[in-house]
Image: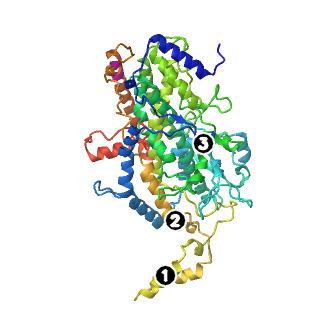
Amino acid sequence: MSNAPADEDFAAVYMRTKQRLGVLYHEGEFRYPHNGPWPERSFDYPYGQAPEVLNIPADEQKDWDLHVGQYYKDNALGSLHTGLSPFGIQAAEFAAACMARNGLRAYDDIDDGQFAELLCEGLYSKFLEPLTDADRDQFAVDIIDTDHYAYYKSDYRCMRVVKDTWPGEYAAPSIALVRRPKDESRRYDWEAVAIALSHKGDDGDYVPVRKAPIFRPKDPNWWLARYYVLQGAIHRINLIDHVKVHFPSDAVNAITKTVLPRWHLVYKFLLPHFRLTLPVNYAVLEGQRSLINRDTWYPWSPFAAKGSEVRRLLPFAWAGAAFYDMDDTDSFPPFRFSLSPDTMPDPDDPAHATRPTYIGLGLSRYGAFQRDYYEPVLALAKQVVAQLPPPPADPAAHDDLAWLEIQHWAAECAKFMPGFPDWRAICDSETLARVLAYLVWNAAVVHTSDHATLHRMMDQRPVPFVLRTPPPKDPDTPVRTEVGKVLPAGVGTALNHLLERLEGDTGPVEAFAEWLEREKDGVVKSHSLVELAGPADLTYAKMADLLFYLPHNTTLLYDCDYGFQADDSAMVPEGQHRPLLGAARKQALAAAIDAFKRDLDAVDASHQEAINRFGFPKLRPDPGLDPASAEYRRQAQQQCMGAGIQY
Ligand SMILES: [Fe+2]
């Protein structure tokens, strides 16, 4: 038994086996024979953020420029040659319509049913989790009918790190308590029961949520507490939970492209799902025009604080709440790779125990939708793995080049991805299939589902990135607003100028000016007049939606090209043997793809109602559309399940 670290053990196995097999690789066998992309630790938040890939290969950057960068240019600015209406104009129209409907409150009103649906049915349902003892203590008087209801929480305590908001804007950490009937037939009849909502105390910092006031549906300030929960939710999805979908697999992406030969079956299977992702993620984290640029601001940045401040949420996606030494923080565990959508490694014993995810707990239609798509992806992954020779019985001593390279790949991935099977554990067909399935499912299904539902929500529901009225300090004293403070400075002067210039009937203007003079220091109680956001805030949020949330796929899951049928013999140097795919295996893979498409179609058909109701992505453009038509392209780009993380 060697005392060397596991990866050094593997280095010896790798070199010895390759030598014995007489393998001399030619650079044509690799996508990047020199200076390939490679992950490195991120030092923005030491140990807090997933490893980043900073050396983006030129060919991938070019692909991004062509398919993603050009989309931003065409749509942000509009373009004579595309005839597109600039997103800025569409966003301003959206903002004007919101202000016309809602006045100073800006955001649409929501009722308790819509609030519960937002938290528990769609995108935000991924935050749902069982209660802890601390939750049961805090909400003891609200958890009253455990015979008939199961209680869960939706946790936004992460917002405690967003302290330095933009002037005039506010944020606050919170926890929402929700429940659903235990009666299976009413499993999605969710209700919001209570909200623990913090605010800043005299010391200028947030009151701990565990000591914060609790708001209930009958309280006068419940309506405002709901908006603060939704503000926490939109920041959490953008900076934490959708971040988990994007960045941790960058390490595997880069290692796959650098380590595995191009003829390798695992390389071929993953490649279509890893296209565009490295430059996309680089643009988000380090790009000059990113919506979370650390030092500057763009009109597509909708957050409540500047980039460097909201980025403080990022470590919750990787190191978890431990990064901020927060206790009582089961909601933000450290990131670990998982072999199933139903479970996640238990943070208390990650190597041996698991706990159910919201999908495994069956908490929402959103979870069921994604779970159902996992099955065909796993079935295809198993078929792909079945075309490899059986895994070596002894991972340290065998003569199988295909598996040796899989071990090499796993050994490197495991260094950057906690929970990734190491070079010994990967030598199991079921484990390898589950690793591949999870990577593909995450990139295609989870990513597109997040974007499609986020876009639907931005279009049809209030999404309060910005709140311009402070969080209420107690549930009962109605929040008031002074008319003079919420109207933009200079309104009175402008009215006077208008009166001077107008001739004839100045009645309504004069009346409004008199009312303003009378009421400007007065107090208005109606919450419909409490200012929550301004037209600019809504415009920026809609810009972010149109540029970044609205899906813009380049390729689709349904028909992406794995290149299984390609003839790779030209890659192999004279006199060398490689485990290339023969005719029988190519045929088996073609049959597996056909079965995959049938299975995907069946999942799509079984979720039609939820696709229409919640904006979940559909599998492919409507049958009958001409693939050359603009409508086919629009549906493929904006409404369908993409092959990977491409925006
Ligand atoms: Fe994304």
Q: Is residue 101 above or below residue 456?
A: below
Q: Nearer the viewer, residue 188 or 106?
A: 106
The span from disc 2 to disc 3 (Cα, nearest Å) is: 36 Å
Residue 228 screen position, x and y as percent:
60, 56
- Of residues 120 and 345, the one nearer the viewer is 345
Q: Amino acid at mark 1?
A: Leu
SS class, disc 2: loop
Q: Quadrant of the N terminus?
A: top right
Q: Crowdedness of circle 3 by 10 Å Cα count: few (<14), some, many (20+)?
A: few
State which tag comes first along the sequence, 2 or 3: 3
Q: In the image, which is nearer the foreground, mark 3 or mark 1?
A: 3
**Residue 495's disc number:** 1
**Could you tell me which residue is drawn at 58 percent across and 63 percent down?**
468
Residue at label 3?
A: 43
Kindly state the secondary structure of the residue where label 3 is placed: loop
Residue 32 is covered by the magenta coloring: no
**Secondary structure category for the residue under label 1:** helix
Q: Mark 3 is on which residue type? A: Phe
Nearest the eye: 217 or 4: 4
Residue range of the region highlighted in magenta in the rendering: 585-591
Name above or below for residue 609 compared with residue 16: below
